[in-house]
């Protein structure tokens, strides 16, 4: 079904007036280059002499004197948080406009960047942290985050050169950039995502912007764009987070050079700067706001050292619990360009085993063969299409002990299974969907493996986890969903769907992990497509108990996580904040600042508290 988009003339739907009629005193309409309406009826204005806090009658309550540019703001419990730049020094400041006390109070500042600033704008993320984008003339840009009076660099960016205006739609996490000689572009504002640049509105003849792009302002679910001539106001709506459609094109009876928009209910209130008349004019139009989506954000408390290779390198973690002192436990992680990494509970790397291109890793402890007991780690080796077996001693030292060939063409995912009858088995998959189940043995000659079962999914799998307590195997088919079947080698692989890909579970389906609680067991899943994690009850009907993202822990200088591959969870009492266990996740993008990938540790107590888990 095709959707029709409304294109109307301004005269038919907008009513104009001077802003003075809407409350801004005429004495400042000619002076103010940028204005923002405040909740108490007052105004925040920027002009060549500074930034001013005005009451509803236009009386100045407070002022920051400097040659200010690029005003942007977000609501605050005491009024408004505003950012602007000193045009002489290029320092960017964040001030609280306190409408109760009538004061402008400094909150944080960002040092002058090593490039010429063209624009500055604010972004408030799902964690309610305030970010500042510094947009450079030649395309060099930076993203900062503010916290408790400080500002910290999040990442450096390469954006379209000569961007004159920027604004962010917080709800869709979209940074909009106005580039006069090409048009308006959309960029991912969320730092924990892949950098993606998309066209929104282009210069004619490629789009409908006459003379290029002028000032812009973000809307809930879209963006308002003045063309360079200032005679048309284009309203674009974002659909499905991917495409942008012109919902309205509004003809102006004058030339506008700047714009401020306030969204209220299903209405947009505009303030448009009429440069010729030296005044601001108000108008409004209907605008249906998209439904806001809320998601729990949980902070990590430990991060590992970063890996020694660039690119998509870190992949899958596993946890080994120390037999006497859980605080001396280890986290194992694969490096797809190097081998196996070993970290302590503080995230410090203790070992690197250069075993080649490892993908997935898993651990089982206290495996008995005859009179001997072993703690075992195994991983898939992609160059050889083999399995690598490691032995872990009581001090957490890991050593390679054996390699087992498979007949798979593109070995990929992997997990271990410890049957209740004893021994150790391994599930390994191929990108074509093939699963093979191996039984691992040990005798005087060493370790060996034997193939005991094979079956196949329709498309590419990777993550899997065995529930040793109930002899079940959970498998992630990346584009389709989560399956469960018997883990027993002598049973048929009758597949049952646990959860299909959809609104909650967004492809790719990646890491799977099992948490064994005192009252209930839980299946955790990496929903890579929207950088989130799902908590499901591990028994049918597999009720979804919660969905969360891992955000920044600015107090500890730890960034959030995104596009996670492997995960692992344990209910072992590791002490302190990890007394109820911990979740370990791979992070696809290292920020604060940019760096190579690593792994993050999250206390299970924070997850349990968020979703009232038993």
Image (spheres, grey):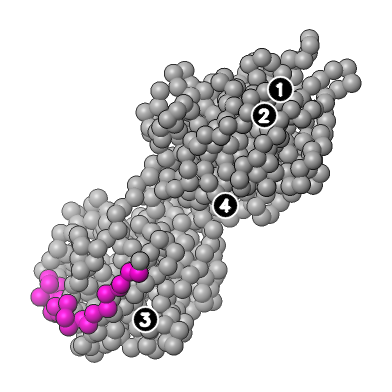
Query: Does 7 lie within the magenta span?
Result: yes
Q: Determine which of the numbered discs, if any, sits on residue 31 in the image.
A: none
Is the Cβ of the residue at disc 1 closer than 8 Å to that at disc 3?
Answer: no
Range drawn in magenta: 2-26
Is the Cβ of the residue at disc 2 closer than 8 Å to that at disc 1?
Answer: yes
Residue assigned mark 1:
424
If you read the primary sequence from the N terminus, does the residue marked by circle 2 or circle 1 appear first?
Answer: 2
Whole-percent x, y for residue 336 in the image: 71, 47
Whole-percent x, y for residue 126 in the image: 38, 50
Residue assigned mark 2:
416
Q: Residues within 10 Å of mark 3 (few under 14, many from 20)?
A: many
Disc 4 on helix, strand or loop? loop
If you read the primary sequence from the N terminus, does the residue marked by circle 2 or circle 4 appear first?
Answer: 2
Between tags 4 and 1, which lies in front?
Answer: 1
Query: Does 394 lie within the magenta span?
Result: no
If you read the primary sequence from the N terminus, does the residue marked by circle 2 or circle 3 appear first?
Answer: 3
Between tags 2 and 4, which lies in front?
Answer: 2
The Cα–Cα distance between marks 1 and 3, rounded to whole angstroms, is 66 Å
Disc 3 on helix, strand or loop? strand
Q: Is residue 173 left or right of residue 602?
A: left
Disc 1 on helix, strand or loop? strand
Work out which quarter of the rendered image holds the N terminus and state it. bottom left
If you read the primary sequence from the N terminus, does the residue marked by circle 3 or circle 4 appear first?
Answer: 3
The Cα–Cα distance between marks 3 and 4, rounded to whole angstroms, is 33 Å
Residue 347 image-quadrant placement: top right
If you read the primary sequence from the N terminus, does the residue marked by circle 4 or circle 1 appear first?
Answer: 1
Vertical position of residue 565 compared to residue 59: above or below? above
The Cα–Cα distance between marks 4 and 1, rounded to whole angstroms, is 35 Å
Residue assigned mark 4:
589
Vertical position of residue 101 compared to residue 267: above or below? above
Residue assigned mark 3:
214
Disc 2 on helix, strand or loop? strand
């Amino acid at each position: 079904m095709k959707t029709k988009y409304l294109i109307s003339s301004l005269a038919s739907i907008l009513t104009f007036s001077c802003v003075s009629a809407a409350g801004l005193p005429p004495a400042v309409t000619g002076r103010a280059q940028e204005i923002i309406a405040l909740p108490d009826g007052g105004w925040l204005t920027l002009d060549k002499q500074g930034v001013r806090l005005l009451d509803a009658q236009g009386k100045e309550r407070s002022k920051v004197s400097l040659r200010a540019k690029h005003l942007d703001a977000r609501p605050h419990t005491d009024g408004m948080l505003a950012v602007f730049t000193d045009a002489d020094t290029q320092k960017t400041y964040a001030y609280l406009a306190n409408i109760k006390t009538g004061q402008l109070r400094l909150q944080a500042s960002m040092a002058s960047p090593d490039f010429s600033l063209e624009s500055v704008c604010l972004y408030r993320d799902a964690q309610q942290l305030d970010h500042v984008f510094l947009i450079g003339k030649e395309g060099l840009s930076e993203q900062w985050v503010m916290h408790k009076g400080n500002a910290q660099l999040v990442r450096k960016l390469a954006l379209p050169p000569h961007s004159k205006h920027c604004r962010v739609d917080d709800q869709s996490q979209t940074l909009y950039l106005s580039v006069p000689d090409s048009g308006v572009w959309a960029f991912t504002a969320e730092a924990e995502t892949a950098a993606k640049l998309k066209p929104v509105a282009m210069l004619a003849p490629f789009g409908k912007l006459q003379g290029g792009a002028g000032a812009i302002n973000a809307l809930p679910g879209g963006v308002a764009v003045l063309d360079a001539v200032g005679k048309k106001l284009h309203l674009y709506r974002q659909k499905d987070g991917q495409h942008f459609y012109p919902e309205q094109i509004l003809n102006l009876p004058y030339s506008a050079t700047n714009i401020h928009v306030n969204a209220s209910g299903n209405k947009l209130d505009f303030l448009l700067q009429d440069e010729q008349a030296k005044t601001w004019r108000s108008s409004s139009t209907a605008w249906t706001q998209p439904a806001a989506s809320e998601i729990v954000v949980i902070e990590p408390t430990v991060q590992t050292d970063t890996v020694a290779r660039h690119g998509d390198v870190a992949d899958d973690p596993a946890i080994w619990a120390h037999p006497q002192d859980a605080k001396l436990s280890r986290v194992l992680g694969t490096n797809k360009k190097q081998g196996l990494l070993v970290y302590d509970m503080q995230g410090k790397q203790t070992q690197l085993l250069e075993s080649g291109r490892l993908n997935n890793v898993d651990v089982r402890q206290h495996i008995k063969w005859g009179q001997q007991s072993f703690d075992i780690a195994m991983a898939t080796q992609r160059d050889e299409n083999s399995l690598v077996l490691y032995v872990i001693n009581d001090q957490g030292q890991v050593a390679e002990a054996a390699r087992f060939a498979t007949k798979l063409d593109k070995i990929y995912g992997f997990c271990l299974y410890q049957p209740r009858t004893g021994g150790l088995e391994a599930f390994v998959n191929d990108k074509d969907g093939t699963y093979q189940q191996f039984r691992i043995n040990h005798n005087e000659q060493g370790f060996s493996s034997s193939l005991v079962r094979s079956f196949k999914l329709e498309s590419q799998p990777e993550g899997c986890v065995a529930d040793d307590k109930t002899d079940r195997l959970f498998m992630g088919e990346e584009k389709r969903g989560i399956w469960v079947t018997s883990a027993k080698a002598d049973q048929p692989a009758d597949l049952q769907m646990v959860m299909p890909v959809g609104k909650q579970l967004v492809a790719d389906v990646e890491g799977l992990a099992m948490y064994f609680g005192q009252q209930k067991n839980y299946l955790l899943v990496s929903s890579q497509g929207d950088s989130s994690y799902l908590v499901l009850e591990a028994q049918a009907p597999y009720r979804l108990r919660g969905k969360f993202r891992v955000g920044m822990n600015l107090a500890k200088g730890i960034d959030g996580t995104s596009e996670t591959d492997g995960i692992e969870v344990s209910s072992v009492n590791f002490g302190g904040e990890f007394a109820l266990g911990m979740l370990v996740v791979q992070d696809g993008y290292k920020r604060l600042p940019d760096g190579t990938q690593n792994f993050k540790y999250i206390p299970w107590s924070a997850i349990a508290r968020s979703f009232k888990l038993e």
